[in-house]
Every structure is written in structure tokens, then in C-alpha cells.
Amino acid sequence: MLADCFDIELLDELKENNISAFNTIYHNYSRSIYLYLLDKLKDHELCNDVLQDIFVTIWEKRDTLIIDTSLKAYLYQAARFKIVDIYRRDVKFKKYLSEFADQIMADHFTIINRIDQKNKLTEIEMAINNLPERMKEIFILSRFEHQTTRDIASKTNLSPQTVKNQISKALRILRINYMSIDVFLFFFTLIFFR
């Protein structure tokens, strides 16, 4: 009760910008509040920061400070609010880190897939370039320019059956001599004769 009366006097003096009153409040309560924070947060540096923040807020809001309970109860309540804020931020931060890590992994796999696709396309290009010249021309017209067998036959002065045979041979050569199975499957999905 005596401490509460003394605290009321200190608060009145604090509202009148008395730095000695503030220093007395800090001296009387900072150690117990610090130990309370340390018990909950387990981090000396963080506890020091929170403690300083609590007392800086008291000094900054000294003119409008309304304390319905005891000063001690008010300070402990302020410490509890700070602890809850820290836990809440920590949970959000961990969630953000988790989402960020997921995004990095997704980007990593996207990049790996792109590199893999680029390597496969390079391999395909090299394999096609090694086909006999006429077969290569027919294959490119069929698979990359999407021309029909009839159009290719007309353009190359070959019969439609010869064009089909050239495309089949090209696919067989690519499958046997140059490509891994998954790349062959890529070509296999492109097989359509018009």
C-alpha cells in the first residue's frame, strides 16, 4: 500500500517532466521486469531491447499516461503485451520464411527444369543437324513447320509415301543413335501424318 502511494507520487512527478521520478521508477522496477522478460523470451539482448522500449514508451506518454492499477501491475502488463507481440511476429516471420523457402525451392526446380529442357533441346537440335540433308529438311517441315505430308511432297517433288518413310527413318535414327528415351517420347508424341 505504501509502495502504491509512493508510485502515485512518482507518476504525478513524471507527468510534470521530472526526470528523477522517471529514474526512480526505472531503478525500482527495471530488474524485476527484465527477469520476467528473460524467463519468457530466453534472450538477453531481446529482453534489454523490450525493457528499454517499455520505459521509453512510459517517458514518451508521460503526459497522457493513465494507470488504473498499480504501477507494478501496469509494467508487467506492458511486458506481457510486448511478449505476445514478439511471439506473434515470430510466428508470422516463420510462416514467411517457410513460404519463402517453398518459393525458392519452386524457383530452383523451375530453373533446373528449364536448364534440363534447354539441354535436351540442344541435344535434339544437334541430332537433327546430323540427319542426312534431305531427311532433315523433310523432318523440319513436318515437325517444326507443321506442314502436311502432301505439302511436303509437293514442295520436295517426292511422293507422299516417300515423305512418310523419311519422317519414320528420321525418328528411328534419332531414337536409336542420339536420344534418351524421354526425348524419343517427345518426338513420338509429335508423330502425326497428314
Image (spheres, rainbow, N blue to C red):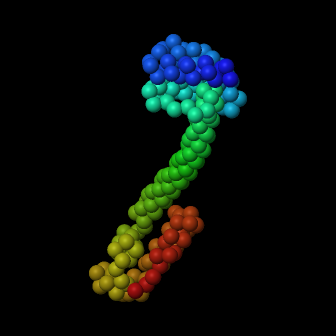
Judge left or right: residue 154 versus residue 56: left
Q: Where is residue 106 in the image (x, y as percent from the top left)?
A: 53, 54
Residue 121 lies in quadrant: bottom left
Q: Where is residue 107 in the image (x, y as percent from the top left)?
A: 50, 52
For residue 130, say whether it is visible.
Answer: no
Judge left or right: residue 60 versus residue 81: left
Q: Which residue is drawn at 59% across and 37% down?
A: 81
Q: Nearer the viewer, residue 144 or 26?
A: 26
Q: Residue at x 51, y 75 (%)?
A: 188
Q: Please tell me whether residue 181 is drawn above or below residue 80 in the rendered image.
A: below
Q: Please tell me whether residue 113 is drawn above or below residue 175 in the rendered image.
A: above
Q: Nearer the viewer, residue 8 or 188?
A: 8
Residue 79 lies in quadrant: top right
Q: Which residue is drawn at 40% across and 86% down?
A: 194
Q: Which of 179 and 158 is in front in this view?
A: 179
Residue at the top extreme of this rendering: 20
Residue at the left extreme of this rendering: 155
Q: Position of residue 181 (x, y in %)?
A: 58, 67
